[in-house]
Image (cartoon, helix red, strand yellow):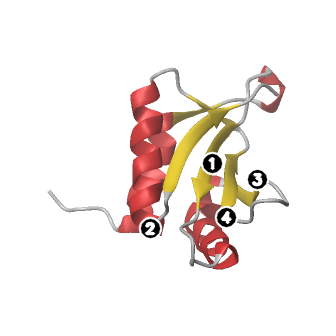
């Protein structure tokens, strides 16, 4: 079985952990908090994440102006599935691909 390239694997895990939802469904947008390792450039990591997840329509922003090493990956039009194992797998793949300190799924109400 052929292995997916690292970028395709990230997108595959994100797609598997989320479900497409209409904008008017009232469901929360799928989000992942990404913690950039100390010493790494958060802007460079954010740009790399944006490039890889752009086909999903994802957005990457700072979580807070106080902590530049915390980023939020949002996937508008998608909501996390109810199976937390799938979100865990996606977060783990994000950590591995982007060499993050940590990543966790975040489900906020719209």
Residue 32 falls in image quadrant:
top right
Q: Which residue is mark 1?
A: 33
Which of 109/100 is in front? 100
Residue 3 percent across, percent down from the top left: 23, 62
* Mark 4 vs 2: CB contact within 8 A: no
Q: Residue at x 70, y 48 (%)?
A: 74
Answer with mark 4 or mark 2, whichever residue precedes in sequence.
4
Where does the image place residue 8, in percent across and percent down from the top left?
42, 61
Q: Residues within 10 Å of mark 1 (few under 14, many from 20)?
A: many
Image coordinates of residue 102 in percent, x first then y, are 50, 53
Vertical comparison of 21 with 14: above or below = above
Can the viewer see residue 13 in this picture?
Answer: no
Tell me how far mark 1 sits from mark 4, CA to CA. 10 Å
Viewed as shown, does residue 87 lie left or right of 85?
right
- In this picture, is 17 found above or below 83? below
Mark 1 and mark 4 lie on one chain; the one further toward the N terminus is 1
Q: Mark 3 = which residue?
A: 63
Alpha carbon separation for disc pair 1 and 2: 14 Å
Q: Residue at 39% of width from left, 61% of height from top?
A: 96
- The answer to which of 14 and 65 lies nearer the viewer is 65
- Residue at mark 2 to residue at mark 3: CA–CA distance: 18 Å
Q: Residue at x 58, y 57 (%)?
A: 35
Viewed as shown, does residue 101 lie left or right of 3? Answer: right
Q: Which residue is mark 2?
A: 99
């Amino acid at each position: 079985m052929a292995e997916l390239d690292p970028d395709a694997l990230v997108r595959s895990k994100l797609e598997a952990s989320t479900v497409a939802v209409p904008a008017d469904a009232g469901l929360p947008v799928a989000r992942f908090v990404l913690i950039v390792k100390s010493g790494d450039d958060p802007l460079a990591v954010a740009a790399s994440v944006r490039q890889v997840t752009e086909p999903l329509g994802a957005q990457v922003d700072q979580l807070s102006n106080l902590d530049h090493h915390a980023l939020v990956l949002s996937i508008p039009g998608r909501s996390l599935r109810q199976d937390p194992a799938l979100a865990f797998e996606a977060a783990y793949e994000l950590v591995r691909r982007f060499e993050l300190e940590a990543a966790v799924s975040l489900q906020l109400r719209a």
